[in-house]
Image (cartoon, rainbow, N blue to C red):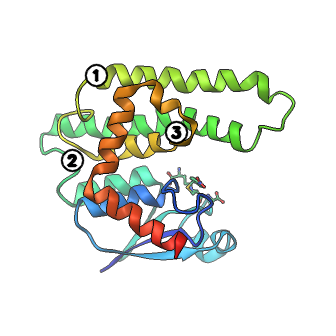
Amino acid sequence: MTITITAFERSPDGGKGLARDTRVRWALEEVGQPYEVRLVSFRAMKEPAHLALHPFGQIPTYEDGDLALFETGSIVLHIAERHPGLLPDDANARARVITWMFAAVNTVEPAILELVTARLLERDKPWSRERMPLVEDRVRDRLKQLSARLGSTHWLDGAFSAGDLMMVSVLLRLKPSGLLDTCSNLAAYVARGEARPAYKRAFAAQWAVNTG
Ligand code: GTB
């Protein structure tokens, strides 16, 4: 059965790889699984056929035979559990990698999304100037903590894993803000992720959709 994912028919970022289908494409490329993409418009995302797959009317979704999934953390974990390459064999190391996946979406991503929302959607609000430094500080705090843990190692726990794939994907959203450059080891960490051939293939595939 061919794996099918959904992605934006036209991503608002014009193909910069920031929409969340990129992390699913990346995981599939890392484990060498071919996949098809069904492109959906913003309108189609809110229609019953797509809502049956994704209760919140979003992308990406993942279908493989009888199985339909939403939520990128869950999709990437599913891919990592079924195909070698993204999770270590040792049970404790595996649990630590899964912990990093949760940390990416539960602890790091919320602060980053708050910043993105503040910058893109709330900039014209009368309270925005006062609030922005607080929002930026929360991101800086998270980055400092993550930077301290990463130190001079290449990846978060041993070899590259699904934990790194999720963390790099989350951090990539910060690139336009310049905040990532405040922690040089994190900027280098993200660059290492982007340099992976599987990431490059995933990026190129979504770029082709949005620029073709
Ligand atoms: N928690 C879910 C997951 O991880 O799967 C979040 C999924 C999600 O936010 N999907 C977004 C979506 O479908 C696309 S990725 N939005 C449409 C809607 O809610 O109606 C978020 C995204 C959108 C645009 C950019 N961009 O232009 O830079 C980046 C990321």
Query: CA–CA distance between discs 1 and 3?
Result: 19 Å
Tell us which disc is closer to us: 2 or 3: 3
Q: Name the residue under label 1.
A: 151
Taking 162 as reference, is 202 above or below it? Answer: below
At which x and y percent is residue 176? 55, 42
Seen from the viewer's position, the closer of residues 47 and 9 is 9
Q: How far apart are marks 2 and 1 (CA)?
A: 21 Å
Q: Specify few, some or many for label 1: CA neighbours under 10 Å numbering under 14, 14-19, or 20 or more.
A: few
Residue 67, compared with residue 96, is above or below; it is: below
Foreground pick, 81 / 179 = 179
98 is higher (above) or lower (below) than 143: below
Farthest residue in the left direction? Answer: 90
Q: Residue 87 carries which label?
A: 2
- Kindly state the secondary structure of the residue where label 2 is placed: loop
In the image, taking residue 108 as reference, residue 189 lies left or right, namely left
Mark 1 touches mark 3? (CB < 8 Å):
no
In x, y percent, where is residue 152?
25, 24
Q: Which amino acid does the dot numbered 1 rest on?
A: Gly
Q: Quadrant of ligand 1?
A: bottom right
- Rendered view: 73 above or below 163: below
**Residues tagged 2 and 1 counted as in contact (Cβ below 8 A):** no
Image quarter (top left, top right, bottom left or bottom right) of the N terminus:
bottom left
Residue reaching furthest bottom?
Answer: 1
**Left or right for 61, reference 27:** right
Residue with the mark numbered 3 = 174
Which residue is drawn at the image coordinates 40% and 61% (left, top)?
203
The answer to which image quadrant residue 167 occupies is top left
Residue at image position (25%, 35%) is 155
Which amino acid is tagged 2?
Leu
The residue under the point 26% across, 58% down is 197
Residue 147 on image: x %, y % = 37, 24
Which is nearer the eye, 69 or 84? Answer: 84
